[in-house]
């Protein structure tokens, strides 16, 4: 990838704003060392700043000490952006970091835009585009699985897969070119081999995509507790969250809105919702809660139907079981510490009061998430491009099998090659880069 030279030197806070132990101000560009020398004075005078050596001293502005701090200079190309980079590590707090940034801006630094440091790293060949995206995926990871997936992508897992797929496409294009140049000698052999190879590569790309897993990695697993009033949904929510999140009473209809809480199961963030009890005779305010409960069930990744094991099943229970039959769900027979009033093979016995069966329920909820992060692609942009490339490959196979000219088939192979290149940024326009990096935080 061609390296870019930037005239401006950017600076921004690289740590979250607010009170904290330290604040890191990052500087990158041709004037990074000059700006560092202007705004940082080492406690022990030095003639030259040694690259990658942390120094103790003071942040200053116009000779006035702002803070006691540490600083480091990282000369190109051994830096995150492959430019000269400097960092000033001050005490945390908005006031100090704001004053240091003001001093840098007064010396000619430009405020960094969102993702500009990583964008420079990409444009300078430090990272390909998929690895650059993994940086933000890691920063915003909501659980261990998401972080592991981001680390695999950052270490080149996606890049290596895409490069291997593009290498196979180069081989296919080379065979087509040979058939066009020497039709009498190799065209028949190439034609017989092209469609199976194109279909095999399309299958490989498709199997690397799992949109549901990617959505769970990014946003968490949406789980809704649903059932009649007074079956113990709120008590179960409190037990699962290990906190008194929902009000529990013996009065039917206590829960009138969706109550949410989060927990972590096997590295996956789970968003748990308690809903209003489902019944036809609800009064107007409660009816709004019932409507919201139905909406929550429709949009959940997993519905947990809660039944009162101490009472016989009623028509409302059977209606709810029918409602969730075609979607992913679990059935829980709550109050298993009391005498059972019915048996249902699909129902998992639990007790929100004693905690019996709760570990098994948590395990089942975790299993419903599947193995997010295990599929190769974990970002929607990558999966969209991979599926489009797979479709081009299938079109190529179809054209070959229909007896169309090989030069027409090569058009689809070139389309697939280009689409896969968009994943790693081999050829990506500024509009695409803008849409990707505008979602980054400032300072990254």
Image (cartoon, helix red, strand yellow):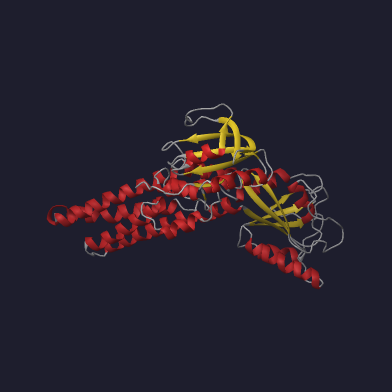
* Snapshot quadrant of residue 65: top right
> Can the viewer see residue 322 in this picture?
no
Q: Position of residue 444 (x, y in %)?
A: 53, 47
Q: Position of residue 261 (x, y in %)?
A: 72, 52
Q: Position of residue 305 (x, y in %)?
A: 71, 58
* Snapshot quadrant of residue 323: bottom right
**Most extreme residue toward the left, as rendered?**
184
Judge by depth and name the residue closer to the eye, 245 or 100. Answer: 100
Instruction: Count how many numbered circles sit on residues in the image.
Output: 0
Left or right: residue 10 versus residue 140 is left
Left or right: residue 423 versus residue 45 is left
> Can the viewer see residue 391 in this picture?
yes
Judge by depth and name the residue closer to the eye, 202 or 259. Answer: 259
Q: Is residue 27 above or below residue 408?
A: above
**Most extreme residue toward the bottom, as rendered?**
284
**Most extreme residue toward the right, as rendered?**
250
Judge by depth and name the residue closer to the eye, 30 or 279. Answer: 30
Q: Position of residue 410 (x, y in %)?
A: 26, 59
* Snapshot quadrant of residue 183: bottom left
Q: Residue at x 67, y 38 (%)?
A: 21
Q: Residue at x 46, y 46 (%)?
A: 131
Q: Is residue 235 above or below residue 27?
A: below
Left or right: residue 131 versus residue 296 is left
Left or right: residue 349 versus residue 384 is right
């Amino acid at each position: 990838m061609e390296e870019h030279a930037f005239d401006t030197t950017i600076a921004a806070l690289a740590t979250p704003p607010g009170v904290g132990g330290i604040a890191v101000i990052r500087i990158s560009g041709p004037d990074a060392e000059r700006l560092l020398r202007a705004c940082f004075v080492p406690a022990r005078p030095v003639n030259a700043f040694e690259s990658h050596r942390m120094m103790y001293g003071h942040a200053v502005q116009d000779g006035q000490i702002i803070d006691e701090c540490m600083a480091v200079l990282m000369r190109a190309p051994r830096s995150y952006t492959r430019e000269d980079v400097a960092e000033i590590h001050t005490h945390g707090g908005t006031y100090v970091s704001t004053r240091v940034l003001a001093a840098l801006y007064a010396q000619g630094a430009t405020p960094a835009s969102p993702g500009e440091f990583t964008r420079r790293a990409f444009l300078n060949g430090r990272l390909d585009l998929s690895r650059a995206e993994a940086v933000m995926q890691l920063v915003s990871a909501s659980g261990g699985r998401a972080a592991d997936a981001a680390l695999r992508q950052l270490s080149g897992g996606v890049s290596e897969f895409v490069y291997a797929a593009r290498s196979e496409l180069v081989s296919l294009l080379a065979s087509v070119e040979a058939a066009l140049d020497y039709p009498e000698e190799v065209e028949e052999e190439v034609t017989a081999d092209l469609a199976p190879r194109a279909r095999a590569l399309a299958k490989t790309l498709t199997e690397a995509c799992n949109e549901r897993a990617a959505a769970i990695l990014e946003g968490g697993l949406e789980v809704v507790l649903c059932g009649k009033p007074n079956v113990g949904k709120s008590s179960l929510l409190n037990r699962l969250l290990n906190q008194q999140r929902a009000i529990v009473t013996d009065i039917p209809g206590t829960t009138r809105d969706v109550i949410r809480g989060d927990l972590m199961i096997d590295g996956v963030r789970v968003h748990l919702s308690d809903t209003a009890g489902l019944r036809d005779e609800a009064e107007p305010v409660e009816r709004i809660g019932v409507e919201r409960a139905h909406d929550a069930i429709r949009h959940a990744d997993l519905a947990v139907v809660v039944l009162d094991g101490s009472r016989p099943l009623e028509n409302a229970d059977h209606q709810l079981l029918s409602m969730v039959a075609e979607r992913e769900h679990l059935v829980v027979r709550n109050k298993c510490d009391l005498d059972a009033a019915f048996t249902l093979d699909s129902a998992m016995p639990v007790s929100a009061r004693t905690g019996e069966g709760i570990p098994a329920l948590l395990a089942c909820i975790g299993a419903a998430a599947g193995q997010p992060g295990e599929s190769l692609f974990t970002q929607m942009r990558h999966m969209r491009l991979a599926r489009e490339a797979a479709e081009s490959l299938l079109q190529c196979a179809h054209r070959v099998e229909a007896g169309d000219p090989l030069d027409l088939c090569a058009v689809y192979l070139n389309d697939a090659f280009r689409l896969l290149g968009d994943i790693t940024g081999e050829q990506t326009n500024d509009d695409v880069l803008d849409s990707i990096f505008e979602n980054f935080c400032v300072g990254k």
